[in-house]
Image: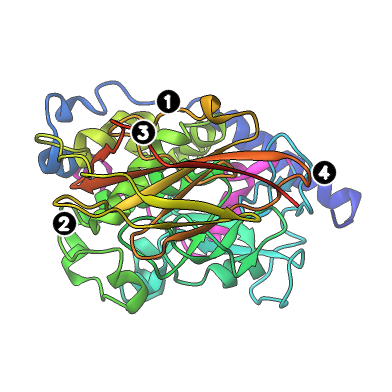
Amino acid sequence: MKNFSLLRYFTLAIIVLVLIANTLKAGIPPNYYTPVNGLTGAPLKTALHNIIRNHTRKTYDYLWTAFYTTDDKTPLTVWDMYSDIPDGTPPYVYDFGTDQCATTPGHENGCYNREHTFPKSWWGGGDLAADTMYTDLFHIVPTDSYVNSRRSNYPYGQVGTATWTSLNGSKLGPCTTPGYTGTAFEPRDEFKGDVARNILYMATRYESRIDTWQIYPEANVVLDGTSYPCFDQWHIDLLLAWNASDPVSQKEIDRNEAVYLIQLNRNPFIDHPEYVNQIWGPTGAPVEEPANHASSFSAHTITLNWTDATGDVVPNGYLIRMSAVGFNNIAIPADGVLVADDAFNKNIAPGIQTCTFGELTPGTVYYFKIYGYTINNGLLDYKTDGTPMQTSIIAY
């Protein structure tokens, strides 16, 4: 944390106390969401759009001031999702104001700037100074400037083998979410729901403009050019999974209230996270599960290899699960629930036929099982009947 004058601390403290006093008056206004009662799918999304559109626009420079109450981890320090480690010690912490910057120093722990969760190049720019999207706080957060630059315009996704990792564990590298294998950026698990709900807000708040958004190479793998569903199916599956695996936190609730007092609109997916599935969730009958399990499952140090399953129904992806206790401690995945990648679970697209688990303890026996699955329009079915392939290996 950088040092600056006692007078500056005092001045900022007064600002924060005033803004906190205003925040105490926040809350969902009576009947705010009444117009959406009974709606699902595209009609629900459009009804929410009509509620949250026409918010009060602030200038881009004003965002620095807004962050004091929208993204304060303490009254004087920044809540940076790209450096924070919840329930742990972050590698660095920024002070409001004195540590902000407009240019990137070329390394982490230099300064914080303004990250567009939904990259501005995805909608093509134009007159950014007058564009409401450019200054909408619901998708703009303070982040380490260097990590922000590494994320660039890449979509969010599950990353397998990272090509670069930030000091708090955010990763950049090839995406393992079924449906996309290009470069993606993966934040820490504790902030995946935050990111998902930010992006879904943008698709809802600006649905009347979606058909004007320029489709850059990075955006073309995410956006489908329509107001509904707006996203390619792989990205919908990812956002649904992250919304479910990382529920709304107190941080998000507080931020929603703070932004509401500034913009006079709300993120409906923080107030009602169930709207996510009601709009983009699966419909219809489940697809048939894969015909066969993967074969020739073997381990080489911490790298697993297999032969893709064959048959009249082939998998769209594979879930590899690990345990350090035994095969019986590996839970059977539940149909309809996409398991997020973590230290014990990896999703791999067909055709890759290899997977690496890292940070294992030498001398420990690790146990693995592999499950193929089909996924279509958000409907997911694991191959669970019969016996899945399994293997074990001592890490060294």
Please state the horizontal and vertical placement of residue 317, each as a whole percent of the image. 33, 52
The mark that comes first in sequence, 2 or 4, is 4
For the residues marked 3 and 4, what is the alpha-carbon distance in whole angstroms? 65 Å
Q: How far separated are the C-alphas under marks 2 and 4?
A: 47 Å
Q: Mark 4 sits on what residue?
A: 10
Which residues lie in the magenta part?
49-75
User: Mark on residue 27?
Assistant: 1
Residue depicted at x 30% and y 60%: 179
Indicate which disc residue 337 carries: none
The amino acid type found where label 4 is placed reads Phe
Q: In which quarter of the image is residue 373?
A: top left
Q: In this view, does 230 lie to the left or right of 71?
A: left
The type of colouring in the image is rainbow
- Distance from disc 3 to disc 1, alpha carbons, whole Å, reads 51 Å
Q: Earlier in the sequence, mark 3 or mark 4?
A: 4
Task: Find disc 3 in the rendering and name its residue.
Answer: 387
Q: Kindly identify which residue carries mark 2.
A: 227
Foreground residue, 246 or 266? 246
